[in-house]
Image: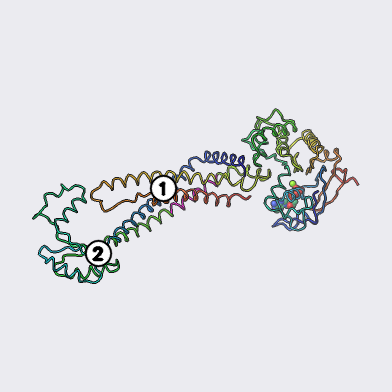
Amino acid sequence: MIEFKDVTKSYPGSDTPALADFSLQMEHGEFIFLVGPSGAGKSTLIKLFFREQLPTEGQILFDGKNIATFEKAALLKHRRQIGMVFQDFRLLKQKTVFENVAFALEVLGKSAKEIQEKVPLALAKVGLADKGSSFPAELSGGEQQRVGVARALVKDPLILIADEPTGNLDRDTSWQLMELFETINQGGTTVIVATHAWDVVDRMQKRVISLEAGHLNRDEKRGSYRDEH
Amino acid sequence: MNINSLKYCLRQSVVSLKRNFWLAVVTSCIIAVSLAILGGFLLMAVNAGQLIRNVESNVEIGVFLYADADVSAVQKQINSLEGVNSVTFVSKDEGLVTFSNSLGDPALLAGLKGEDNPLPDAYRVKATDTALVAGLAESIRAMPGVEMADYGEELVGRILKITGWLNTLFVGISVLLALGAVFLIVTTIRLSVMARLEEIGIMKYLGASDWYIRFPFLLEGMAMGWVGTLVSTIALGLAYSKLATSLRQDAFAFFIRPVTSVEQLAPIFVGLLLLGTLMGGIGSLISVRKFLRV
Ligand SMILES: Nc1ncnc2c1ncn2[C@@H]1O[C@H](COP(=O)(O)OP(=O)(O)O)[C@@H](O)[C@H]1O
Ligand SMILES: [Mg+2]
């Protein structure tokens, strides 16, 4: 369980906090959309949970433990159970698709044998089983993002977090990607997606957490992008 | 850090070294030169130390008499001085034999026997204590019939003076060069870090440990240091053994016996190897700390 308790995050040099007195609970296995206008604090929320940033005030608990207190080893363990997907894909151009996905296991010190086993499985899950030897530049945007998802998935994370993963994709491709996330969530992985793709949010009827200027503005179990009341 | 990670780090270092190949070569060369100079200085210091010790432990006053001196009177006077341990008479004929033997070829001076012998009669005087040598030499010099009394004070003084100067010079030069080398390592590693900035950013999100990210750069720096040191120690070793051999065969350098004992030389060469590796490591640590926020 992920719990934000009265979290405030102020970046140095800006007078309004990116998150202000923010509280929230997320359960294992949930599918959650983070919505809200640009600058609302979605990325900040994600960075705080990944502990890329520390909260100015308040606590973030993961399974009851305050993640701010994690020492090196515990922090690595925390981060290793989170798979990250980015708007700009962040693939390595000089590596093939296979190598990009393998990289996620390499940096964890996994054996060549394990890499040979797991990478094809991850590529198959995202529907790119036959693209292993291609380079990112040879793929469409949607395919590149699937490589990003495969790289996040290959280490079997507890939680998959995607920050505007469809920001650079067209509508059909976005929809397919969201369906992929739903499949992954059905396998038991918690999925958190920050997005502007309102039509997808409306259609999928998942939990929607809406932020506005650093405040929690709406939290609905089967919500839509905009407030309907 | 397991064996898979180690393999990865090694591979990364090799890739980086290849990418910055010429810079790495130049850096290694500078390290080699600075360490060779430092090593040359250390070898010289070891040899000078041995030379001084040789001279000091054999302090013996050589007393040379005028041709018309009263040999037995002088001996009596010397014996009466306080602090004299032994007095050995070396006749001019014995002196000639010793000298020609020391030249390695007795035949060389064969023509100078008897009346033609240019050497004076002499005494070799040993003191009971090295501290008394200077005073004894002084008293002996004042005796009638004594042309000179010498115990190599000038030699010791000159060796000390020269090595003092050279010490400062060599240490200064090698410190400057070492600083330059470390700076070059910092630059090379910085380039490697810059070339991999995107990759490093991704690695952090993938949960790579700080050490996993840093280690390839550390290896890269140490490899440059190590190559440089290897080159310099090999060059220095060859040059030194050549010099030592030719000194041994040189009749006019018979008083210089180069140090060849492994116990004395090994620490120098091992020390240089460690130092070069350390310089590489320190240079890359500086660079990684400065340019790699992990
Ligand atoms: N590293 C940062 N330094 C300073 N201000 C930041 C930083 N990151 C985000 N902000 C500010 O915090 C606020 C929230 O940003 P962000 O969390 O990126 O919002 P969102 O992802 O919802 O668009 C914005 O006003 C943004 O300008
Ligand atoms: Mg954002």
Q: Magenta residues, as a range?
A: B176-191
> Are the residues flagged by discs 2 and 1 from a single subunit?
yes
Q: Quadrant of the N terminus of chain B?
A: top right
Please give the name of the residue rendered at 21% of the width and 51% of the height, measured from the top-left corner: B102
* Crowd rating for badge 1 (residues with CA inside 10 Å; few <14, some 14–19, many 20+): some
Q: Residue furthest top?
A: A130
Q: Is residue B28 left or right of residue B204?
A: left
Point out the tag, 2 or 1, that comes first from the N-terminus.
Answer: 1
Q: Amino acid at mark 1?
A: Val
Residue at numbered disc 2? B126
Q: Is residue B56 magenta?
A: no
Query: Which of the colour schemes (rainbow, by chain, secondary structure, one colour) is used?
Result: rainbow
| Helix, strand or loop at mark 1 | helix
Q: Please name the predominant secondary structure of the magenta segment in the image.
A: helix
Q: Is residue B185 magenta?
A: yes
Of B88 and A45, nearer the camera is B88
Q: Residue furthest right?
A: A229
- Location of residue B46 (image quadrant): bottom left
Single out the mark in the foreground, 2 or 1: 2
Of A135 and B48, nearer the camera is B48
Depicted A126 relative to depicted B285: above or below: above
Tell me the chain of label 1: B
- Location of residue A124 (image quadrant): top right
Residue at numbered disc 1? B33
Q: Position of residue B129 (x, y in %)?
A: 29, 67
Q: Is residue A141 left or right of residue B249?
A: right
Tell me the chain of label 2: B
Q: Position of residue B81 (x, y in %)?
A: 22, 71
| Helix, strand or loop at mark 2 | strand
Q: Position of residue A10 (x, y in %)?
A: 73, 56
Q: Residue furthest left?
A: B115
